[in-house]
Image (cartoon, grey):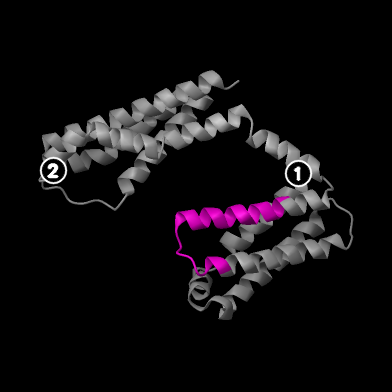
Amino acid sequence: MELLLLLILAHILGDFYFQKNSWVACRQENHLKSPALYKHLLVHLVFTSLALLFAPIAISWQLPAAVALVVISHFIIDLIKSYLRPNLLNLVLDQLVHFLVLLFIWAWLDNLGWELVYELGYILLSPETLLLIAIYLIAATPTSILISTALKSYTRQLENAEDPQGLEKAGRLIGYTERWLIISFVLVGQYTGIGFLLAAKSIFRFGDLTSNHERRLTEYMLLGTLFSFAVALALGGIARYWLP
């Protein structure tokens, strides 16, 4: 496990702390001809080599091969990413592929073989893991659709109201995040965190509501918040009841 942690640490340093924004912009614009791409690969070569140097494993031909695998995989992944739109989904997929490469290197160098694959498969496909994935997925888009449908008649009443537009899709992401936080608080038994979350949201919303002097908007936001919290609490309760 120490080897895997060192590899992950090297990756985090190389990908997030020792990569300039100008490098990313250069790669997005010039792709294969970008000098920044090769500077980034050099950074990962150094950090991965240091990680393997300090890892508790024997010196062998596998170490330079592992470094080469990290560098080559970074080259391919980052080159492909340079042609894609920089958004959250592509960032998550990018980091997931990098992690899978590091996981493979760890299993290879530590001679874990198919035992690791079996254990990971058992964990990922266990009823507990599948239930958690289902709960968090339900708390996102399905719950947003449910709340939107429940408040549809009230939404029409606000269509002509003078209300400054917020950031596109920001409300949906706020809803996802607050419900995920509530479910997580329920699972760990930290119900006070839910109270702080509700208080924080109320504080941030207070200025909007008072500045608009709009009772309908206030009631609409209150209904949406209560629906969101109620569904999240119910999902969190279901997960906690069924999980050991």
Identify the residue shown where x is 69% and y is 68%: 72
Q: Is residue 57 left or right of residue 70?
A: right
Q: 121 or 177, which is in the foreground?
A: 121
Q: Secondary structure at mark 1?
A: loop
Q: Which residue is mark 1?
A: 1
Question: Which quadrant of the view contains residue 60?
Answer: bottom right
- How far apart marks 2 and 1 lie (CA) works out to 55 Å
Relative to residue 35, is residue 141 depicted above or below?
above
Q: In the depicted view, which residue is nearer to us: 164 or 190?
A: 164
Which comes sooner in the sequence, label 2 or label 1? Answer: 1
Residue at screen point 76% across, 41% down: 116
The numbered disc on residue 62 is: none
Q: What residue does disc 2 label?
A: 212
Q: In the rendered image of this protein, does residue 46 appear above or below residue 196? A: below
* x and y, in percent, of residue 130 in the image: 57, 32
Residue displayed at 53% across by 31% down: 132
Residue furthest out toward the top: 241
Q: Position of residue 110 (x, y in %)?
A: 83, 48
What quarter of the picture does the N terminus occupy?
top right
Q: Secondary structure at mark 2?
A: helix
Seen in the image, is 45 located left or right of residue 171?
A: right
**Where residue 86 appears, x then y in whole percent?**
46, 63
Q: Is residue 94 magenta?
A: yes
Label 1 neighbourhood size at 10 Å, few (<14), some (14-19), many (20+)? few
Residue sitting at x 64%, y 65%: 74
* Magenta-colored span: 80-103
Picture coordinates of residue 175, whole percent (x, y): 35, 39
Q: Quick check: 208 left or right of 73?
A: left
Please name the amino acid that badge 2 sits on. Asn
Quarter of the figure with the C terminus: top right
Asked whether residue 190 appears in the rendered view, the answer is no
Give the tally of numbered discs.
2
